[in-house]
Image (spheres, grey):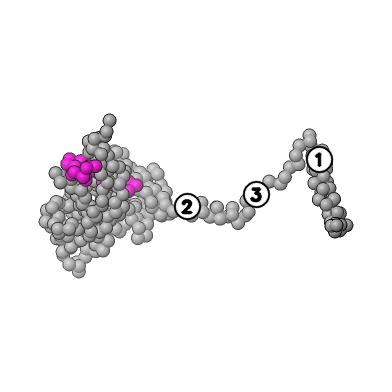
Amino acid sequence: MGCPAPTWANDLKHIFWIAPLLAGLLLAWAIARSPAGQWPQMPAFTQPEVDSDLHGLTEKFASRASASLAGQVVDTSGGPIADAVVVARSGEQAQWTRSDEQGRFVLHSLPPGKAQVSAWLLGKLPAGLEVQLPSQDLSVVLAESEYQAGSAMPSSKSRALTGRVESCTRDGSLGARHEVLLIPRAPVNELQSAVLATTMTSEAGEFQFDKLALGSYQVVVLPEWARGGSWPDLTAPAAQFLECSELEPSTLTIPLACGSVLASLADEEGEPVEGALIVIRPAGAPGKVWPTTSTGPDGRFEFRELPAGKYELDLRAGEGSILALPVEIFAGEVSQPDLPAIVVRKRS
């Protein structure tokens, strides 16, 4: 004979059965008391204040991360000036570009706040002004100048400067000419100032400035195919600045910091593919494309003088293509990526 259940256990069973019934009656009473028999309104959920403040700070710092500068370089009559060098400098940070055929220019990823903006064109007086970034409609006026293009301004001291660009290729040869561009770093002073100067090297890398105004310069070296442009700058970081003074040596050596890519392309059967079109560009910058090349009889191709960084390769042959193949370039090194086989003819 089993033991009888204790009395408190029977009472507990009744409580578990009655509790849901009481909860339902209370809910029905609350609905009946609410307007038009609707569900009672619950207080709205609000984000904790600490999260709201954190979100605001995140947006604040994100908005301060970078700013842009856009505008137009014009002459005194309002006409556009092309190929002017525009420099925006904030503290030690500086960016530069050239104006297009309509005189327009754009610079991105600048620190917000005050910046010194200078514009230069050989044969015209430089212009300088202080702006608050971001700025999207800046007008920079360049007036005509009586001094000879590329020479020191009146009352400015100058000196001759000769130099040489050192190769960054694996065989130590340049094999082509380069443009050497000296961009003044100090704010514009029309009476005494460094002056924008540019010259082309020989194929051996030698160059000369007959009369270079004394002052502080940013040194830029561009490959010959990029002459008159604003990229790619091949100058090694250690050689990016020049102090031209009467006490400094009259010779300048500019080492380049770049690498190259060397690879071979084959089809599915392992045979080399000749005449394939190869394009290379910096990753995330589809508008900055190097001059194209093509594969030789052995399927090989090479790009030289690439600043260190991440790039993308596009390869096309017949009906096949390999797009946006990643490759990384290191200064002073030859990158030799293993390329996948390309399908030259698609099977029907």
Range of the magenta residues?
A: 265-285
Q: State the SS at label 3.
A: loop
Examine the rendered structure and indicate whether residue 50 appears above or below residue 272. Answer: below
Disc 1 or 2, which lies upstream in sequence? 1
Q: Is residue 158 visible?
A: no
Q: Outermost residue, top direction? A: 348
Distance (Cα) linking label 1 and label 2: 51 Å
Residue indicated by mark 2: 62
Badge 3 amino acid: Thr
Task: Please state the horizontal and vertical placement of residue 229, each as a whole percent of the image.
Answer: 24, 47
Residue indicated by mark 3: 46
Q: Residues within 10 Å of mark 3 (few under 14, many from 20)?
A: few
Examine the rendered structure and indicate whether residue 196 appears above or below residue 269. Answer: below
Question: Which residue sits at x=79%, y=36%?
Answer: 37
Q: Is residue 169 visible?
A: yes
Residue indicated by mark 1: 28
Question: Which residue sits at x=14%, y=44%?
Answer: 297
Question: Which residue sits at x=72%, y=45%?
Answer: 42
Q: Main secondary structure of the magenta part?
A: loop
Residue 332 placement: quadrant: bottom left
Task: Please state the horizontal and vertical placement of residue 270, each as a whole percent of the image.
Answer: 21, 45
Badge 2 amino acid: Ala
Q: How many marks?
A: 3
Which of the two residues, 322 or 104, is positioned nearer the viewer here? 322
Distance (Cα) linking label 3 and label 2: 24 Å
Residue 104 relative to residue 200: left or right = right
Badge 1 amino acid: Ala
